[in-house]
Amino acid sequence: MHTFPERDCLVSLSLTKRVPPNTSIVKETMAHETAIPSFSKNAMILDSPEPPSVWKEVTGTVKNALIPRGDKPFSPLSFFLSCIKGLFPVLQWGRSYNLKSFRSDFMAGLTLASLGIPQSIGYANLAKLDPQYGLYTSVVPPLIYAVMGSSREIAIGPVAVVSLLLSSMIQNIVDPTADPDTYLKLVFTVTFLTGIFQASFGLLRLGFLVDLLSHAAIVGFMAGAAIVIGLQQLKGLLGLGHFTNNTDVISVIKAVSSAVHQPWHSGNFLIGCSFLILILATRFIARRNKKYFWLSAIAPLLSVILSTLIVFITKADKHGVKIIQHVHGGLNPSSAKQIQLTQPYLAECAKIAIVCAVIALTEAIAVGRSFASVRGYRLDGNKEMMAMGFMNVAGSLSSCYVATGSFSRSAVNFSAGCKTAVSNIVMAATVFLALQLFTRLLYYTPVAILASIILSALPGLIDFKEAMSIWKVDKMDFVICLGAFLGVLFGSVEIGLSIAIIISFAKIIIRAIRPRMEVLGRIEGTEIFCSIRQFPMAIQTQSVLVIRMDSSFLCFVNANFIRERIIRWVTEARDTIIEKAGDKLESVIIDMSSMSIHFIYIFNSIFFLLKIFQIINSSCYAFPSDVTSIDTSGLSTLEEIHKELVFLNLQVINEIIFSTKTFKWKRNKDCNFYLFFFFSSHLPPIIINQN
């Protein structure tokens, strides 16, 4: 039999002080348990001090957040140095950086640039910006992140989903074709506000705002966005001159069907599909053989070079093949004067910035944590938010749009053997050299090749296995995933996100109002108590009803539901026991410990109760060890349950108030009972009621 010192301590106290001589069974049951601690320790446990006040909790939280912990006395200088080290992680890992690590980072950075240059140009086209703005975004933000970020593998730059967000939401305010200058100003303004929001989230530790989008919502949103992005690339792949600005699938299908009757050149489709097959083939080879990961990394850049040469040699641009033409080179120009922080567009830009901030942070932190878990280190979410925020603020001042961590480029960076964030510096330097020297060579680059590069990156955004896993684990989560997917696909990006958030909050409210409640039984031959609904083979203990409530709080939103469910089950159990066995319901055990599936290793505790049953007529046992919040409505509900069970001729305890910090217990004036609390995360308090 398992021994529980906490239980022995408290039971012995009650037995010593209050149990009459006829409780020999209890003493006999406890005789073989562990030694009994002293009375003073027992009294100390029962007479616990009052919890700290709200003011002390608030000031303590602020102090722990701002003042570094440790045994050293606080001083302004140490506080300043701690803040600097926290803000610039490069000051910590830079001390041990060596030439061997630089060689690995240098090769990883070059490999990263070979993939990032063509992708940056393509994503700028997706954001309805000139190609150079995508290259600008791959220069300044990676440099800022390299000294402020805490991830070693994440690759910074423009990404497909954020580019789609910007183009689809800003074009509702200003048409990029009719007024490109105002559109560009709004892009820089949104980028600046996005950085402000991200830095504020990290500084004020508001990371929970990112969690408003659940994992299921992100899976559905990414899949829907991938399909929308793919449909948008039909314009470049087919060389269409006129195309819809709407992102929903119905509008895109209508635009494609109407474009069939327009003149279009098959050379665009031939070039785009040929190199799309080439990129996908190299990616397939790289997945089958990890040694050839570099092949898939250089395939987009190789495709750009070959397609540009083909168009230049054959003069295909004279025969209908669309090219990107002039690309501005040189250092990032300043865009500080183009940021518009005044009306009439400030409110709309702020709304777009909040959405972009949350999506960008969600993607970047998810990517960073996935690789950090592989390398065995912890990623600080708050530091990541501040790093992302500062790099986007700096980017908005240097002609960049919103940048974040890219999963495809981060995977290449990881496979290339990067050691630190120096690989981002090497990539940024390579892109800068390309802006200085090679932008003129991009004049004959076909638009179709940019569409094929974007299309090749989309399969990684659609995760069928994860969607099926969500369906198997939680059907409500799958509804959230499906709602985000269909909302993006048939509505817009904003509609998809809104649907996902609304369903997520509805799920929380429903589970709060109607918490799951189960009748428990024991699996024969084991010490496991579990739900008889989920495990029909579980056997209910005769004359005992065990009920579990899966909720961490008992308050006004769920109190009435819980009361009605408990009374109904008690009534049904009493009638069933009388009809089948001719016996009567003696005890009701209410488990409020919020254990998710079953009781493990408490069979001996229940066995102890069953021995106590020999000296009691009827009683109620409450297990409120993990119900951490009970409001006045919850207390009223407990009183109502007490009255109704008394009306059903079941003697119960009058009142229990129990939380993680304090508890009170009162003696029932109508009956002679004994109250035992078991302080253990695996054991509930036991209430013994004896006539």
Image (cartoon, rainbow, N blue to C red):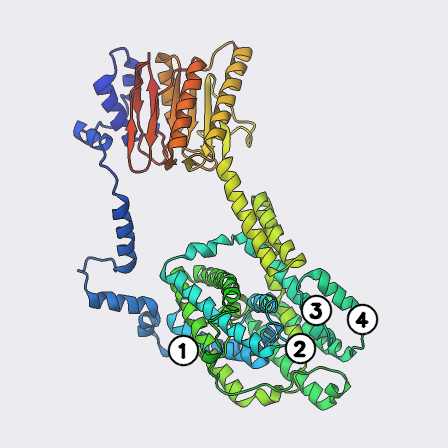
For residue 222, side relative to residue 660 (left or right): right
Q: Which residue is mark 2?
A: 449
Please tell me which residue lies in front, 562 or 110. Answer: 562
Q: Earlier in the sequence, mark 3 or mark 1?
A: 1
**In the image, what residue type sits under mark 1?**
Phe
Residue, far top: 582
- The x, y position of residue 53, in whole percent, is 26, 43
- Residue at x-position 42% and y-position 64%: 385
Q: Earlier in the sequence, mark 3 or mark 4?
A: 3
Of circles 3 and 1, the one toward us is 3
- The x, y position of residue 660, in whole percent, is 32, 37
Q: Which residue is mark 3?
A: 244
On residue 84, the disc is: none
**In the image, what residue type sits under mark 2?**
Ile
Of circles 2 and 1, the one toward us is 2
Q: CA distance from mark 2 to mark 1?
A: 33 Å
Q: Which residue is mark 1?
A: 102
- Other residues around mark 2 within 10 Å, as few (<14) / some (14–19) / many (≥20): many
- Residue at x-position 26% and y-position 27%: 10
The vertical placement of 421 against 650, above or below, is: below
Q: CA distance from mark 2 to mark 4?
A: 21 Å
Q: CA distance from mark 2 to mark 3?
A: 20 Å
Please tell me which residue lies in front, 68 or 421. Answer: 68
The vertical placement of 521 against 312, above or below, is: above
